[in-house]
Amino acid sequence: MENVIRVEALAKVFGNQTALENVDFQVEKGETFGFLGPSGAGKTTTIKILTGQLMQTSGEAFVFNIPTSELKKGMHRKRVGVLTDNSGLYERLSIHDNLKLFCDLYEVPRSRIEEVLDMVNLTNEKKKAVSKLSKGMLQRVLLARTFLHEPDLLFLDEPTSALDPTNSKQIHDSLRRMNEKGTTIFLTTHDMTEAETLCNRVAFLNKGKIQLMDEPKKLRRQYSDNTVIIELKDGRELKRTSGPEHAQEIYQYMMDDQIVSIHSDEPTLGDIFVDITGRELV
Ligand SMILES: Nc1ncnc2c1ncn2[C@@H]1O[C@H](COP(=O)(O)OP(=O)(O)OP(=O)(O)O)[C@@H](O)[C@H]1O
């Protein structure tokens, strides 16, 4: 598989503060990769290094096999989209007029505007001035702007932070659509549900170090204690190990038509994070 991002022994020190220490990971073409961690873990620092806004103290970082320090110079810059919290939109202009300006800047045909507005579900709002938009709409305009030039790789720094569930869902849907079209996505978040629904793989970052990295499903299985929850019609919820030792009992509940549901008692990504770091993800 082709690597889009490769990071080796990456470290970043600010004065006497170590923000990243010996970080290694790779992101493959077509993946949605989640970089998860609490506040101050080093997520934004990593994005800044990968997008050429900050130089690492030591180690290597490559995007499209090019050292990130050289990204700004070449054509490769156009292959990357970055969503951060600095807006850079013209407040008095409409959504549509803002996107027109960015089309010209990126040398993208203006016909692309309708496509990206549709992707973020803002077609009906396109004449609204940016100053009149809600936080969620503004975030969707910023996302539409990053979609304009159809980047091969998208960096998203906490894209749904402090948004309501409807706006978050619309953003998730548009990210899925971009990913289906072939865009690789690197996403930071402390929202574990977001990570579970969007990411093929996640890395847990804590105090500048990667603690764990795998597919969400594999992590949940690995940390599961092999128990099942049996919900009965009389309202009881029983927790049993999933081996043969309880087969007879469960069979009897089935024969008595007592079972509402049986499901595995796997931990969430949030549970696993707290388990390995002893820290809540806030
Ligand atoms: N320019 C800077 N100068 C000094 N220290 C910095 C600078 N930027 C980041 N840091 C420190 O590096 C560490 C990692 O910060 P970073 O912003 O990467 O964390 P984060 O995981 O993105 O946090 P959050 O979720 O709050 O955005 C923190 O301790 C932070 O205080």
Image (cartoon, rainbow, N blue to C red):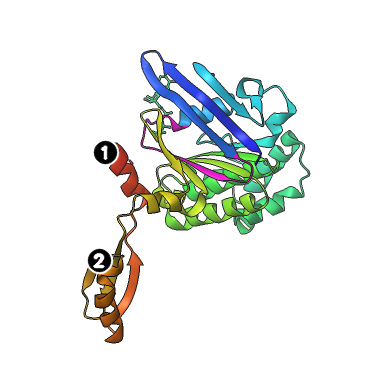
| Secondary structure found at label 2 | strand
Q: Which of disc 2 and disc 1 is earlier in sequence?
A: 2
The residue beneath circle 2 is 240
Ligand 1 sits in which quadrant?
top left
Residue 246, compared with residue 172, is above or below; it is below
Please tell me the numbered disc located at residue 141.
none
Residue sitting at x 53%, y 52%: 171
Name the image quarter holding residue 108: top right
Q: Farthest residue in the front direction? A: 244
Q: Is residue 126 visible?
A: no
Question: What type is the residue that disc 1 sits on?
Answer: Gly
Residue 107 position by quadrant: top right
Q: Name the residue tied to disc 1.
A: 278
Q: Position of residue 208 (x, y in %)?
A: 40, 27
Name the secondary structure under disc 1: loop
Left or right of 61 in this view: 113: right
For the record, the magenta segment spans 28-43
